[in-house]
Image: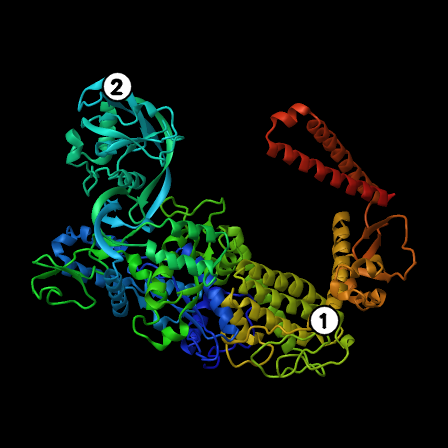
Amino acid sequence: MTTTETNKPTEMAKAYDSSTVEQRIYEMWERGGYFKPRVDPDKKPFTIIQPPPNVTGELHLGHALTSTIEDILIRWHRMKGDPTLWMPGLDHAAISTQNVVERELAKEGISRHDLGREKFLERVWEWVNKYRHVITDQHKRLGVSADWDRIVFTLDPQVTKAVRTTFLNLYNDGLIYRGERLINWCPKDGTALSDLEVKHEEVAGHLWYLRYPVLKDGSESEVEPGEFFVVATTRPETMVADTAVAINPASERWLKYRGRRVLLPIVDRPIPVIEDEAVDVAFGTGALKITPGHDFNDFEIGQRHGLPVLNGMTLDGHLSEVAGPYEGVERFAARAAIVSQLGREGLLEKVEDYTTSIGHCDRCNTIVEPLISTQWFVKMEPLAKEAIRVVRRNQIRIVPDRFYATYFQWMENIRDWCISRQIWWGHRIPVWYCADGHMFAAIEDPTTCAECGSTAIEQDEDTLDTWFSSQLWPHVTLGWPDKTKDLEYFYPTSVMETGYDIIFFWVARMIMIGLYNTGEIPFEWVYLHGMVLNKDGKKMSKSKGTGVDPLPVIDKYGADALRFVLAAGGGPGNDMRLSDQKLEGGRNFANKLWNIARYVISTAANSPPSPGAERASRSQSRLGDSGGELGDAGGRLQSRSARGELALEDRWILSRATQVAGEADHFLSQFLINEAAQRVRNFVWDEFADWYVEMSKVRLREGDQSPIPVLREVLDTSLRLLHPFMPFVTEEIWQNGGAASGATEPLIVAEWPTIESGKVDEEAEAIVEIAIEIVRSIRNTRAEKGVEPGRWVEAHIQPRPAEDWIALRSGLVGRQIDMEAALQKLAPVMSYLARVKPLHLLAPGEAPPTGEVVTSVLSGAIVTLPVGGLFDVEAERARIAKQVAEAEDELSRLKSKLGDANFRVKAPKEIVAHEEARLASVQSRLEGLRGQLDQLG
């Protein structure tokens, strides 16, 4: 690793400007090779394989969230000294890429068929080579610290070899077959789709109740007068391909037609009445039309009963020859015409409004059509068995736990996977056919038939589903099928992190094929994040104008702000809301950190060193223990034998830093990234900046330099803890002297704070927290009474018996603590922070003043403030009395309302609960106001 390459300015800028920092810092990281793993055969590596974004894509908030989470884990493990590899990639995105290029061709007035396959693929490669860097560059804007020299494209030669090897093995093992089955079809793109490529949307539609005339026994065309078998459907145009109607054996309404036949309207074809327990008696009339060629559930029912399968639709979305008079009519036009004809003939019983989930092509948003087609399939059930077993044995663990049920449900009911696509861009199916009717698969392009030696061979026209190559991702990126050292060292990978909506498809398939190809699990952990919603809790959508492009957000707020907001969001598997207010909060935090660091660094630079507080050169961080050891060559201040030699507030902040470092480490190890982010933020902003920095100013103003090494130590630790979440601002501060000593390497490879036993100082924490509670109480009283901010007030503080609060801290039970002496040491701090002078510390039994006073009973002390002359007592009494009267009126009204039996019976439960909560709140407020009046006399 090289040393720091940035030029350190002589003085930090007054304000942090992310636009001038981020690119410079990122380039420094890349030049230094800090994203590359440092292999150590004696250590277990930490490896993440980046879910490969589409080559056609632009960075969206899903990418930003995924990449932020992964980068946090990568940076954390890198700082912990683990050999760390983040493998980046790009997906060829078969359908999406082909659509983009075809649109470009359309502008020229030509199609891919005009060019032919070879020339068309040349055009696609031109486009890909021009734009494939875009999303990589965008990821760099976000701070992604992947090893970009290793980036893998899903059409790279090694991937092609892996894809063909896998296909051949599955084919030879009988797990890949070609057959006629029901598949999802996109009429616009002209290709089959996998389940993953179909998005379901709730759509307002109708439920049409259709009358099928009941045939007389033995007749092919004569119907029973006035007798109809009624079915409800959301897709009446598919009725032309019905091959049965079905009832549930438990349904009484239609049992009289058991074994009978009905006449299918429009095409006048007799179809049987069958019985099947899969029929939902609660839907529509409790009976179903069965169309095996256009519905997956119907297909399964048809298979059980040996029903014929009719294809009622062409590949371009028009009705087929089985539709009789409607042959060649576009499917939705046919729907309207068929419904109209049924109405005229008295065969439409009624129409109801109905909301249903309809599948749309994920690329072009066209409504998908289930239809029968000859395609290539993978038998999934044999592969799923082992994938289920390794998860049940905790060889692969899923975060959060609730998705175990989702995983098992899908895997235990898995269907065969249609892997062929009728497009040209992608991995062409490695199967060849010869003129003599032979079919064979191969890894390398053959010149002769493997069965008969004929040279008259042609390759299958179809390509493989993009996800066939993506399922190989964890091991193919590391060199499989060649046994490379990388594969042996970095495989299995540590974490596969992705959105919860594709656990069924991609994650499950990676587990299955990883086990099949290598005999090993592909990864140890599956981390599933939620979606990023807008401020109103709605899913973002570019088509609806509610999407957010991360790059303008980065331009406005900075990458660190966006990263921190995403990291601190919903937590594992939970959706999160993103708003300008949150982003402003993230930017404010970056600015707060900058201002803290600027103060600490400038203070240290302008102050002479205190005796015993020299810092030893180091590039790792070790927090001091409760006895005061804060600085040897391992990173602590020089050893001090007596606990009391360090000020209480110093001991407190160092102990809190230790606690928070341990908590952050624990949360990250449990993938509770949001908890870690929030905990570190609260420590840095609240405890360090708002409390300790202000406390330290008391001694610094008196010429005591002893707080400086503590300020430096805690800033150093804060930067290390925050770096995974906010890498740019922390690195920039580090480069400007934020390290507690002259570290020679950048923060990205600095050591994560080492958490050692015996460093938590519960006594100092308890005492200082009592002092903070006292200061807050005085500040609150001043604010409530309208005391001018600059005015000094008198205060009397009486420590409560130690046993009242020691019991709350298990580590202090049995400890003898002189609270009066402890608070005396903190009196200058409390006086300064609360604007109190004089501050009286009362001895046990000493009574505080009475009269015009305000008394606050706290957990560790009783605080009494004489308020005479600080404000107009009569005016304050009148103001509070008015509030008491208003609260009493509201309380009376709420009691009357809740006492009304009719209200409790008729009002919704949530309204009653809301009013009861308001009553409790008003009662509490009234008690407080009355207490304030009593204090005023």
Q: Is residue 403 left or right of residue 642?
A: left
Element assignment for label 2: loop
- Mark 1 lies on a secondary structure that is helix
Q: Position of residue 485 (x, y in %)?
A: 36, 77
Q: Position of residue 419 (x, y in %)?
A: 26, 54
Residue shown at the point (13%, 53%) measured from the top left: 113
Which amino acid type is shown beneath numbered disc 1?
Arg
Instruction: Give the image quarter of residue 122.
Output: bottom left
Tag of residue 651: 1
Whichever of labels 1 and 2 marks the residue nearer the N terminus, that label is 2
The numbered disc on residue 223 is none
- Location of the C terminus by quadrant is top right
Where's the N terminus, which quadrant?
A: bottom left
Disc 1 crowd rating (10 Å Cα; few below 14, some 14-19, many 20+) is many
Q: Residue at x 29, y 59 (%)?
A: 468
Which residue carries the number 2 mark? 346
Q: Quadrant of residue 162?
A: bottom left
Q: Would you say residue 397 is visible in this rendering?
A: yes
Question: Relative to 116, does residue 733 appear above or below in the rendering?
Answer: below
Is residue 888 or residue 590 the one in the foreground?
888
* Image point (37%, 71%), residue name: 148
Residue 407, image x, y percentages: 43, 53
